[in-house]
Amino acid sequence: MQSVIKIGSRESQLAVKQAEIIRDQIMSSDPDISVEIITMKTTGDKILDKSLEKIGGKGLFVKELDRALMDGRIDIAVHSLKDMPMEENPELPILAYGKREDPRDVILYRPGLETLPEQAVIGTSSRRRMLQMERLYPGCTFRGIRGNVQTRMRKLETEGYDGTLLAAAGLKRLGMEQVIGRYLSVDEMIPAAGQGILAVQGRKGDVHRWIDSIDVRESRAAALAERAFIRVTGGDCTSPCAAHAQVRGNELKLTGLYCNEDTEEYSVDVIVADLSKARQAGETLAERMMRERTV
């Protein structure tokens, strides 16, 4: 008898594409499983005229899906890991971390531009991006921008922005690499924790025989290290703090950006650790950087 797995997803084109990626992996690993995608609009999708910090943070993108998991309307939820709160609900754990897509941030230029002008107006609501863009493009100014990929591209054409910043991963999953004006290396702009990784969230105690076919060891280690760093620094997914782990073999190199929010000063540091100690590496680097900034 064929079993049915119900995947919960936000309604946006990108969110559905990400759910389809996980759906295809499940069905490939177990042909006896049928998969249904159930979409829903989250509070974060509905309120587009205020910054995330003012309306409760990125947790607003997951609350409706959390409720659907708890009451059994869906079996799993698929999220961009960078949009998930740093504190996990123990009743709704992350079961798998998918293969990481390109973790870099990218610049999209207003049509007609091939680079940013000297006093560019950048559309972003991310303090992490603002902090690092000020160093790369001194003199630029920022205006808030919200909405999915397509909405932001429309605003770029009509609302006076010279450029905007997005995650490369989303554009690549949508097959829209052609709109990217410039890739920012992970050294130029340290990505948000978890950027490029898909998280599969489920209910505590549920067993899914296909889960190991989705969970990627390197993605899990990177996610644990990056999210531990942000948790210890007191940040969340709207924080200017950032962390990015690169995995080679059994070695993990974690780069962290710690920002003192009182002074807006920030520092960058690196730690190298064994893959099995990923979470501890994130905690150790965060504690070291916080200690050094208070000396």
Image: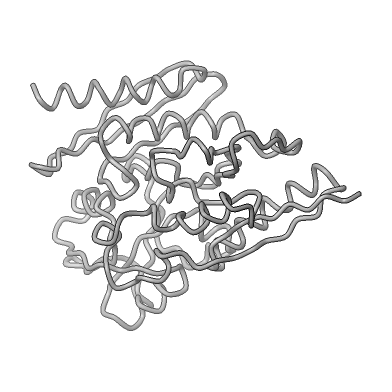
Image quadrant containing the C terminus: top left
Q: Quadrant of residue 124?
A: bottom left
Which residue reaches farthest right? 1
In the rendered view, tell whether residue 206 sits above or below residue 112: above
* Color theme of the render: one colour
Q: Quadrant of residue 265?
A: top left
Q: Quadrant of residue 100?
A: top right
Q: Which residue is nearer to you in this view: 28 or 153?
A: 28
Q: Position of residue 32 (x, y in %)?
A: 87, 47
Numbered label tally: 0
- For the point 26% across and 79% down, the residue is 160
Which residue reaches farthest front? 71
Q: Is residue 125 left or right of residue 74?
A: left
Which residue reaches farthest bottom? 158
In the rendered view, tell whether residue 222 sits above or below residue 66: above
- For the point 13% across and 27% down, the residue is 293
Q: Position of residue 81 (x, y in %)?
A: 48, 46
Q: Is residue 145 left or right of residue 152?
A: left
In the rendered view, tell whether residue 259 sits above or below residue 161: above
Q: Position of residue 46 (x, y in %)?
A: 40, 71
Q: Which residue is nearer to you in this view: 237 or 133?
A: 237
- For the point 37% across and 60% down, the residue is 107
Q: Position of residue 186 (x, y in %)?
A: 38, 42
Q: Which residue is nearer to you in this view: 11 or 71?
A: 71
In the rendered view, tell whether residue 203 sits above or below residue 221: below
